[in-house]
């Protein structure tokens, strides 16, 4: 069975793993040889070791760039946030880790809680092609989303245009709040970005293998070990086990 899975998931004899470099919690640096390091590259390497093949990292600056190549024959697995829009072309496992997404508001903002954000007239600055940006585009009903092409750009837009809210991952907002005296991060979360592993939709054996791998990685403590190894405790958390009937 493993040979059939290997042929389907790594037909070139090498597991080509697409890595999103923009998430510093998942890709925390590079080795002396220039190879990406972090939870995401280590998860991909563990998949390759289970298959008994080498791993090759296919690097992307943003998750949107990675998702755009899903229908091309350039990678075998993709490590990125699972979202319905991306699931149209990528078959995802359940999440192996989660990151809180919440809001930052400027000094003297009347907004005190997350449920006060989605109101008419409010303007939310957000990196549009991020997993949390895609989530907001599906769920915000009254406020206006002001999208940008990157995390840094969303912060710049928030400040320059004096927008009402900045959406982001909590770990990044903890850095942003230090640059903006008087600003506040709202308690709670509007969603949690689900970090998962994806493959081509037509690779049924591969999808089942990856699903089982992720559940074992969570239950055996591998994901927690990687979180601790790369020093992202309290920022990245192990996702709960998927329901038994998870597809």
Image (cartoon, grey):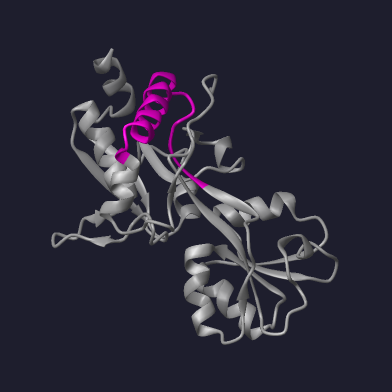
Q: Residue at x 38, y 35 (%)?
A: 218
Q: Quadrant of residue 83?
A: top right
Report whether 33 appears left or right of 227: left
Where does residue 239 sit, x and y in percent of width and height? 47, 41
Q: Residue at x 61, y 85 (%)?
A: 182
Tell me the magenta residue range.
Answer: 194-222
Can you see residue 13?
no
Report whether 230 appears left or right of 177: left
- Is 79 contained in the magenta span? no
The answer to whether residue 82 is above or below residue 26 is: above
Q: Residue at x 36, y 50 (%)?
A: 19
- Is 204 contained in the magenta span? yes
Please identify the residue farthest to the right as the structure is shown: 120
- Which residue is at the front of the view, 17 or 37? 37
Can you see residue 168?
yes
Q: Residue at x 38, y 62 (%)?
A: 24
The answer to whether residue 99 is above or below residue 150 is: above
């Amino acid at each position: 069975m493993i040979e059939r899975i290997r042929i389907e998931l790594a037909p070139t004899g090498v597991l080509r793993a697409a890595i999103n470099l923009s998430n510093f919690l998942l890709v925390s640096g590079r080795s002396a040889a220039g190879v990406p390091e972090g939870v995401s590259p280590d998860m991909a390497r563990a998949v390759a070791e289970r298959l008994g093949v080498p791993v090759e990292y296919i690097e992307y600056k943003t998750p949107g760039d990675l998702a755009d190549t899903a229908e091309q024959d350039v990678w075998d697995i993709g490590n990125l946030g699972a979202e319905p829009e991306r699931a149209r072309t990528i078959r995802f496992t359940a999440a192996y880790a989660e990151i809180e997404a919440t809001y930052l508001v400027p000094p003297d903002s009347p907004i005190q809680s997350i449920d006060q954000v989605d109101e008419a007239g409010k303007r939310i600055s957000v990196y549009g092609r991020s997993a949390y940006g895609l989530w907001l585009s599906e769920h915000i009903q009254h406020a206006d989303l002001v999208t940008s092409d990157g995390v840094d750009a969303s912060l710049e837009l928030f400040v320059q245009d004096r927008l009402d809210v900045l959406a982001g991952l909590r770990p990044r907002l903890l850095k942003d709040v230090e640059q903006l005296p008087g600003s506040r991060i709202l308690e709670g979360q509007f969603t949690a970005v689900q970090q998962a592993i994806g493959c081509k939709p037509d690779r049924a054996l591969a999808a089942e293998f990856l699903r089982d791998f992720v559940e074992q990685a969570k239950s055996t403590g591998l994901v927690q070990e990687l979180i601790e190894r790369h020093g992202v405790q309290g920022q990245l958390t192990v996702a709960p086990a998927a329901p038994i009937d998870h597809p």
